[in-house]
Image (cartoon, rainbow, N blue to C red):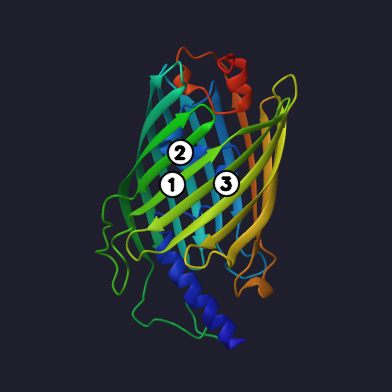
């Protein structure tokens, strides 16, 4: 039991360093909310889109990571969009809260061939705190750092930049997150100052039959400081009705890139959109050494789309077979 406690303490410590200003990305972006990944998606669509997400990791392990987030984005012109992300994250004895303010600009490369390019920028404001109220030695957690005598907290600002290319039903984005070094004056030890990480996201939408689509996608993330990287391989099936409502189901497979056949997480997900209201659920089975001590990771997303309106530029229309078909541009 002591070895397990030590393992969890070390794991939480490493994750707290890794996740500061880098909130955990599981399947939130697959809940029809690509804005989670990149500011370039702000304003793509014909409505105001709001999503609230709750994620509980490693259910069954005390003080496991827990995250709540609220996302909103909307179009403010024919070619521009803005977005806001608010989050609250708890990981062991670390706490962080923050906000992201995003702006995106969308341009048309070719209306005839449906090629669009988007640029995005986010300003990030983050408050990070080490909470020592539980730092007392006991049989389950014997490690106590005597140099920590009060709560340690620090505020940081940073920026994300991204670019998105869309060609008909294909999309690909590349993002650089936390491009500035982090202020660590209030910390000692091995706290990293470089939190730059790169993310790439790509996929394609296939029409499988009338009003249905199949969407495979890949999400790649790499931390520049130590070279760690992981990949998600995803597959979604979506079914529309005549009024534009739909349901979807899918699965996601995550692995470290130096261990592609040893998944970190694997699990199903599903969601539904009805009259502008959205609900999705995903479950991730933990496939590492903690699998015997927890029941997996759960994520719930609820949302609403409203103020639907027409756009004068196809560059802000969403990527889906229904949108592509209704535009009438697939006709020869």
Q: Secondary structure at mark 1?
A: strand
In this rendering, which labeled residue sits more in front, label 1 or label 3? 1
Residue that numbered label 1 is attached to: 200
Q: Is residue 133 visible?
A: no
Q: Is residue 61 visible?
A: yes
Q: Badge 1 local density, few (<14 within 10 Å), some, or many (20+)?
A: many
Residue that numbered label 2 is attached to: 172
The picture places residue 168, in percent across and down from the top left corner, at 51, 26
C-alpha distance separating marks 2 and 1: 7 Å
The picture places residue 78, in percent across and down from the top left corner, at 42, 16
Residue contact at pointers 1 and 3, CB within 8 angstroms: no
Query: Residue, x 26% and y 58% (percent of image)?
Result: 183
Work out whether residue 141 or residue 131 is closer to the camera in this orientation and state it. 141
**Which quadrant is home to the C terminus?**
top right
> Which image quadrant is residue 160 in?
top left
> Which image quadrant is residue 260 in?
bottom right
Residue contact at pointers 2 and 1, CB within 8 angstroms: yes
**Which quadrant is home to the N terminus?**
bottom right
Residue that numbered label 3 is attached to: 28
């Amino acid at each position: 039991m002591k070895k397990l406690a030590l393992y969890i303490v070390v794991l939480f410590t490493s994750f707290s360093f890794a996740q500061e200003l880098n909130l955990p990305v599981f399947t939130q972006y697959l809940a029809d909310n690509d804005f989670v990944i990149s500011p370039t998606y702000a304003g793509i669509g014909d409505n105001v889109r709001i999503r609230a997400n709750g994620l509980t990791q490693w259910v069954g392990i005390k003080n496991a990571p827990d995250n709540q987030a609220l996302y909103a984005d909307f179009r403010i012109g024919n070619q521009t969009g803005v977005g806001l992300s608010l989050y609250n994250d708890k990981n062991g004895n670390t706490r962080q809260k923050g906000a992201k303010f995003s702006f995106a600009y969308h341009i048309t490369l070719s209306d005839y061939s449906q090629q669009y390019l988007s640029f995005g920028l986010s300003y990030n404001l983050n408050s990070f705190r080490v909470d020592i109220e539980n730092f007392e030695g006991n049989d389950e957690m014997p490690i106590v750092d005597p140099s920590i005598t009060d709560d340690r907290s620090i505020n940081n600002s940073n920026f994300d930049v991204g670019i998105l290319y869309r060609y008909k039903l294909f999309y690909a984005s590349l993002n650089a997150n936390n491009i500035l070094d982090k202020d660590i004056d209030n910390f000692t030890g091995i706290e990293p100052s470089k939190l730059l990480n790169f993310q790439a996201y790509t996929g394609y939408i296939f029409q499988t039959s009338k009003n249905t689509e199949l969407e495979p996608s890949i999400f790649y993330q790499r931390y520049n400081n130590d070279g760690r990287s992981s990949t998600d391989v995803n597959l979604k099936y979506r079914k529309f009705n005549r009024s534009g409502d739909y349901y979807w189901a899918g699965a996601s497979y995550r692995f470290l890139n130096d261990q592609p056949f040893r998944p970190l997480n694997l699990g199903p997900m599903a969601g539904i959109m009805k009259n502008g209201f959205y609900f999705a659920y995903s479950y991730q089975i933990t496939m590492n050494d903690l699998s015997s001590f927890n029941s997996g990771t759960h994520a719930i997303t609820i949302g609403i789309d409203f103020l639907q309106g027409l756009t004068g530029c196809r560059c802000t229309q969403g990527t889906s077979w229904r949108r592509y078909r209704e535009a009438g541009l697939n006709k020869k």
